[in-house]
Each structure stands twice: as C-alpha cells, then as structure tokens.
Amino acid sequence: MKTILIFIIFIIVVLAQTFVPVHMIMDSEDILATGAAYKFKTRPIDPTDPFRGKYITLRYEMNHFNTSDTTYAVGEEIYIYIQRNEEGFAQISQVSKLPLEIQEDYVTARVTYYYKGKVSFQLPFNTFYMEETKAYEAELAYDKVNRDSIDDNVYTLVYIKGDKAVLKDVYINDVSIQKYVEK
C-alpha cells in the first residue's frame, strides 16, 4: 500500500513538473500566432557590460514618456499603451498607473526614473537569447551597427497579446540577426 502511494505521488509530481514548462511554451506560441506584431527601434547599449551569458542586452529608443502626472515612483508598475507610427514602428500613445478600458495593446513596465514630467521605464523584453555559437558574433554585430551608423535600421519584433509580450527576433536592416551573423 505504501509503495502504491509513493508511486502515485511520484506520478503527480512528474506531471506537475511537465505541465508548467509546457504551459509556458504554449502561451508563448499562442502569442506569436495570434498576437499583434510591433517593431521597436533599439539604441546602443553600455559598452562596459554589453553581454552576459548567451544573450544580447537590448535598449530601446522608446524608454520614456512626458506626462503631467507628478506621482510616479521608481519601481512602480505602469501600463504603456502602444500603437504603430507611420513607419510601422511602435510608439507610446499613453502611460497609466492603472489599466484603462481602451482597445489598444499594452505592456507593463517598471518606472526607472521620474523627473520634471518625464517618466522613464525599462521595457520587459530587453534580452534576446540565441544559439550559443552565434551569440558573441551577434552581440558584436548589434553593438557595431547601433554605434557606427545612423542609416542602419536596427529593431526588434515583439508580439503582444493581452498583457503578455514575446520577443521574436532582432533585425538589422530587415535581416534577422541570426542570418546577419552568418554573412
């Protein structure tokens, strides 16, 4: 009897440990399949610590918003409502401390700084994981293109659905960074 009980508990634990990652993967795949795609322009990153592990650290041009609300606090969660500009890139339509009853896509972020009507924040999709053998070359290419040329078009493609966002790829001149590194 005791052996059967231990076996049943073992099976439940195995199923639970399998369910959680499968559920996370299915959520991300659903967002990629049915979410809205937005392009976010990037900008250069701090050269002293640009690469940790096997991913690229991303910084975005869209990292602040001018507001008349003076009650923002560092670390506070905010809602950033997004729309596309005429070039097809994401831009902020409004920022709010509470969810609004509007039909616009949004992401949540944390306030990093507030001063004289300008609230700064960090978008939640600021790391791009890559295949281990290509990650270093991709980081160098991303850093070089972002720093050396104002003509190059560097952006990320992010899918947003509800309050969730999935970073799909980083592009340099409309070429995936994974293919760009192979050139």
Image (cartoon, helix red, strand yellow):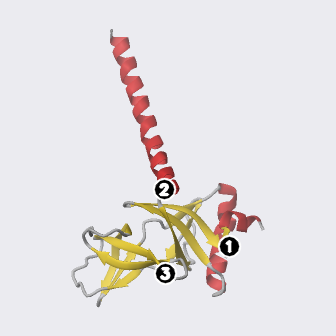
Query: Does 111 appear above or below 1?
Result: below
Label at residue 19: none
| Location of residue 180 in the rendering, given as x and y in whole percent from the top left corner | 71, 68
Query: Does 147 appear above or below 161?
Result: below
Q: Is residue 119 visible?
A: yes
| Location of residue 54 in the rendering, given as x and y in whole percent from the top left corner | 59, 59
Observer-nearest of 83 and 92? 83
Label at residue 141: 1
For marks 1 and 2, give the CA distance. Answer: 31 Å
The answer to which of marks 1 and 2 sits earlier in the sequence is 2
Query: Does 26 appear above or below 182?
Result: above
SS category of the residue bearing label 2: helix
Observer-nearest of 26 and 20? 26
Label at residue 34: 2
Q: Say which residue label 3 marks.
A: 85
Near mark 3 (Cα within 10 A), the count class, few <14, some 14-19 or many ≥20, is few
For marks 1 and 3, give the CA distance. Answer: 27 Å
